[in-house]
Image (tube, rainbow, N blue to C red):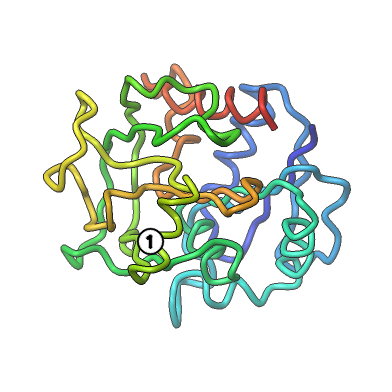
Amino acid sequence: MKFGVVTFPGSNCDQDMIYVLETKLGQKVEKLWHKDSDLKGADFIVLPGGFSYGDYLRSGAIAKLSPIMMEVIKHANKGGYVMGICNGFQILTESGLLEGALLHNNTQKFICKNIHLKAASNSNAITKGLSLERSFKIPIAHGEGRFYAPKNTIDSILENDQVLFRYVSEDGLISEEFNPNGSINNIAGICNKGRNVFGMMPHPERASDSEVNNEDGTLIFDSLLKYC
């Protein structure tokens, strides 16, 4: 499988993602620029974290207008795989590829720390290879990470089993106490109904190397590689 990692002005996790996919996991990676109008044969597109266009107007709102996103949307609508992490998740909601929105954290502060998350089900490629019994330590770094959607949309997401991850305690307890940003239902990531577009706020690429003493994120990538 060939990955395409998109860089927008303000992206700051693109090289982390390229390093993990290429060096740690041995995958082919195509570097894509926001002005490109060609996905260059990539099978799986990744929208990395950062602050695309400085997060002016609203996080992801300007990036969705980049030429590359027209191709990403076409790719997703044809069933191609797309994953957005942090700012990439915000871009996916702004582009309409995922439901809901990412609002300012309920603390109104930027949060950068390790949290724990837990796979909500094994119904998609990102979580299919993960244990539902354990939590994973993954860092977050965002100011607008509070997942929100109207009640009818949340009901639909839950009914269709679209939740990827929830924020939990180290022991896997789902509670508002362990919700770092006020996300509805402790939601840390979702997929679309077709299960080919994935978005999550935590950064698995920052937890995929022994040099940072945390390789929990590698398990997420391993699942992705095995089942996509």
Q: Nearer the viewer, residue 13 or 159?
A: 159
Q: Position of residue 137 (x, y in %)?
A: 32, 29
Left or right position of 148 against 176: right
As drawn, 131 above or below 124: above
Q: Count the marks.
A: 1
Q: Secondary structure at mark 1?
A: helix
Instruction: Quadrant for the N terminus, please.
Output: top right
Q: Nearer the viewer, residue 121 or 165?
A: 121
As drawn, 141 above or below 178: below
Residue lying furthest front: 159
* Residue of label 1: 154
Left or right position of 89 against 172: right
As drawn, 85 above or below 227: below
Give the residue displayed 21% in from the left and 38% down from the top.
Answer: 174
Left or right position of 68 against 103: right
Q: Position of residue 66 (x, y in %)?
A: 69, 73
Give the residue displayed 69% in from the left and 29% down from the top.
Answer: 22
Q: Determine crowd level at label 1: few under 14, some 14-19, many 20+ residues with C-alpha closer than 10 A.
A: some
Residue lying furthest left: 177
Give the residue displayed 87% in from the left and 51% down from the top.
Answer: 40
Instruction: Quadrant for the C terminus, please.
Output: top right
Q: Nearer the viewer, residue 149 or 169?
A: 149
Type of the residue with mark 1: Ile
Give the residue displayed 80% in from the left and 56% down from the top.
Answer: 78
Q: Position of residue 3 (x, y in %)?
A: 74, 40
**Toward which corner of the image does residue 77 lie, by quadrant?**
bottom right
Q: Nearer the viewer, residue 149 or 178?
A: 149
Q: Position of residue 140 (x, y in %)?
A: 34, 45
